Image (cartoon, coloured by chain):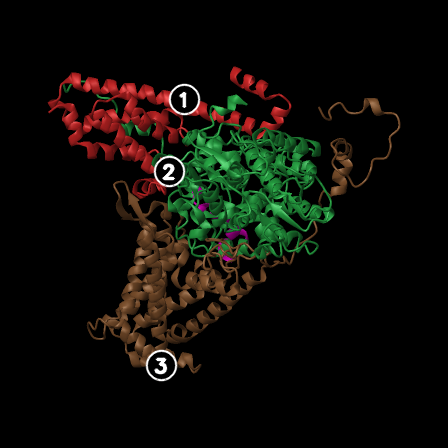
Chain colours: A green, B red, C brown
Amino acid sequence: MSKQPKPPKPDELAKSIEYKTPETQWMETPVKFKPGMWCYGSRPKYLEEVGMPNPREWSPADDDWKLPENWKEIVLDGMKDRLGKYRTFKLFMDICVRCGACADKCHFYIGSGDPKNMPVLRAELMRSVYRKYFTTGGKLFGKTAGARELTEDVIKEWWYYYYQCTECRRCSVFCPYGIDTAEITIMGRELTNLLGLQTDWIGGPVANCYHKGNHLGLEPHTIQSNIEMMCDDIEEITGIRIEPTFNRKGAEILFVTPSGDLFGLPGIYTCMGYLMLFHELGLDYTWSTYASEGGNFGFFTSNEMAKRLHYKIYAEAKRLGVKWILGGECGHMWRLVHQYLNTWWGPPDFLEVPKSPITGTVFENAKSTKMVHVTEFTADLIKHGKIKLDPSRNDHLKITFHDSCNTSRGMGIFEEPRYIIKHVARHFYEMPENTIREKTFCCGSGSGLNAGENMELRMRGGFPRANAVRYVHEKYGVNMLANICAIDRAALPTLMQYWVPEVDVCGVHELVGNALVMTGEKKRTMDLRLEPLPGMEDEEEEE
Amino acid sequence: MGIREQLKENREKILSRWFESILKTYPAETVRFLKKTKDQFHNPVGQTIKEGIEGILFELTGEGEIEKITPFLDRIIRIRAIQDFTPSEAVAFIFQLKGIIREEIDLDRIGSEELLGLDKKIDELALKTFDIYMGCREKLYELKATELRNWTYKLLERANLLKEFEENFKSK
Amino acid sequence: MGALLSFGAVVVLLLIPAIGAGALKLHSLFGVVIPYLAVIVFLVGLINRVIGWGKVPVPFKIPTTCGQQKSLPWIKHSRLESPATGGEVFLRMVLEVLFFRSLFRNLRTEKAPGDRVVYGSSKWLWVAGLAFHYSFLIVFLRHLRFFKQPTPKIIGIIESFDGFLQIGSPHLLVTGLVLFGAVFYLFLRRIFVPQVRYISLPADYFPLFLIMAIAGTGMLMRYFLRVDIIKVKELTMGLATFHPKVPEGISVIFYIHLFLVSTLFAYFPFSKMVHLGGVFLSPTRNLANNTRMVHHPNPWNYPVKVHTYEEYEEEFRDKMIAAGIPVEKQPEPREEEQPTEESEGKE
């Protein structure tokens, strides 16, 4: 029996396929562009439309990226400029001790195992250049001091890895000095954008948003008719016709939401939830076709571009003469509204301190920015018993809540959405503690990475999140992943389809819309997705 | 002692060698993290692979029903299908089991039919892994298309393009 | 590689005073000039560094929020994790600086399959970090006895606590050992955790070796080679009172120790050790999460090009009017042309 030919030993097999990364120091390991990991380069027209440098046809897969002649000077000048403008950038270049506490906190590292996805190393990609050109030690001792030349390969490496970071700030929670890789990624993207290295997926929405007011480039009449179509569906479900207004002067409140809620699935259901709620309250509010985007892909480009795009919100509020602004469910939009908008374009003294016309609650926490998060608004309504809810209409759903990175670690809104969910539904289960709230795992597609061509990257980055969802799915039968972020609503369904296909995705206000008992409504047999409510499967046909 | 008993007896050793050999396919700096971090939420890749191979071996030493093994295979391949691996690299781990088993059990104490039987089983699994791997890759392509459809749902619906879009996609 | 290089550097640093003070008897240079220079470099360098950071503006208020924001009055606000006032920020910083709170977050018991509780190695990083920093602080404070005559009471108290084991004569001081042990652990961690080894630079190993050498020579002096403590204090008091003098007969081990400490001082502002000063300035930690309550100005906020409503309406006016959306300006009546106009429009 022992004479039988043996198959190769497992180790031999492994060697023959040459698995391991070469054990060289990271500085000597040049970046390899792997398929499914990067986004296409921006078409020149997108850059031209907003006046960004070096518009041209280019592909990251090419050897020649067609950089401007003096690219090195541009980058180094750009670094110098920003080192003098952002304390975070300067400080975070200097004080890291490379303790490694952040190393395994990044969802991309956890999902890919690529050591350059460790936050500390992502930052070292930049620090090594900083040392070479901006510190005495680096100038004198070079590599011994952890410094390296800025070369085209370094630029490529930057580009590859700064577009493998979702600016989610999870690493910053664990860093003893609060070093926030998002700040470094933001700088990395600003600098590469000086050379025209924009991605198509970000460049397109930026150009659209600048010009037409929203990322998809919906023109005013299209926005209106999209919302009217949602109203048709609402009428079919409730028997109530809603007539929202657009660009109406003299309304009390301007409502701004990410445009993803206006056209995409399942975002539109969330939008239907807003429409129904505001109608039921008789809220004096208006939509704007000009300020028709709460999100801001400019933030994934440069601070300046973000500021340019977010100009419209206050400008439109002023033009329409509203008293305050209500903002829909969105992640990075709220990071910006909460931490940037007021600094860019405020203080908006032409507005009043937001006060709920229904409950009389004054939103002291928004007294300067004058913009209230819709879950703050709705939680306040529920607390004061101002809306009638029938949570049993969500009984077919076993819900868990995904904290979005931006609203968690760049705002701190944890309780409001949970409070709402617990009142509009009866089956709510938290994911494991390490994976929610300030420790929440990213969807893997934030900060402009939700393109199609980098699907492998997204599936890797989202795996830690999906893994926790699968856990509650298996343990409690969870079948709905609620969230308050438009990118989540766009990206998580795809993530779920791959990892946990039994789980669907919704916004919190879709659940509100389902549970909301409206004055004069007909007997509800369908949820907002036009699917039969639990126990109503037969009634539909009677209609 | 039959092959099943031997597999059971040497279970720990086989598993740990198999796990090691799979981990070797990841960057050297990461192996320790994947191996040592026991929290299934902090280290989903390592833990999923570990539980997966445990499940596969357990079923192999039992009835060896492919249907019962498939979910374990699926979990491992689903991860490897989106990591930096070529198709052959992604599925090679199942073949490695043959060599490891041969080295860990006493070949003189089992009949050759038994070993052939096991090899056949593993070959069946290997075929299954190809199916699963291809399924995962196809899923990725499908997701790209459906995502695009979902994002522009209302626009397409309005323009009555939805049907057309779906038909186009199916025909691809 | 980085470790070897750093080790070599520290060996060289050991040899310099051994030769200079030992063989060449340059006692004034090693006992007075170099220590003074080192302290000057340390002070000027550190102050420069902190001022350098301080001069860079903080354009945006971007605290990392690790807990519930202050919002509606009935929602429990997490004061420490999402501070809304200066006082709350202060408390957050105290926890951060004195207890390494963020690092502590790594401390988590993990549940392995089968509900076995295991501990991640990260716990040890926090413990070793605390042990290292606090023992270093106490060792530093203890040394003040060499610069004050008579020795302040408080230092005596610290020492008596430090020597609570009452082993040997002079009493063994625990912190010296803890310091050495903690630094050694941090070193081992860098060598044996592959991820950490991968990110480590010579600049990470060098301070570890240097501090090990300082602690080592210090303990050697105290317990084994017994330097003449009276003469040492004569020298250090001379330094402290700016009347430097160099007594004869201090053993070379003291000069080695002193030189290494001088190196540490001089190197400090240019190394990663400046995190001592930097941690206080970190915008993700030292700012309040109250941006919607209080306007935060950006000193370099410059005007940018925007797309105004007027431009927008100009482009879409016809479509807006057709859809019944209010406009600011009615279109000028057009002559002719009407039939050829646009084929898109509304369905």
Q: Nearer the viewer, residue C159 or C283?
A: C283
Q: Nearer the viewer, residue C318 or A16?
A: C318
Residue A20 in the image, given as x and y percentages of width and height = 36, 34
On the image, numbered disc 3 is attached to which residue? C152
Determine the residue positioned at 33% across, 81% down.
Answer: C153
Q: Chain of mark 1?
A: B
- Disc 2 marks which residue? A472
Query: Which residue range is magenta in the image?
Result: A116-138
Q: Residue at x 25, y 21 (%)?
A: B65
Q: Looking at numbered disc 3 in the image, what kind of residue is underneath it?
A: Pro
Please say if A517 is above or below A356: above
Taking the image as shown, residue A56 lies to the left or right of residue C133, namely right
Q: Is residue C212 left or right of residue A412?
A: left
Name the residue carrying label 1. B134
Labels 2 and 1 positioned on one and the same chain:
no
The residues tagged by marks 3 and 1 sit, at their Cα atoms, a distance apart of: 76 Å
For the residue pair A132 and C313, the one nearer the viewer reads as C313
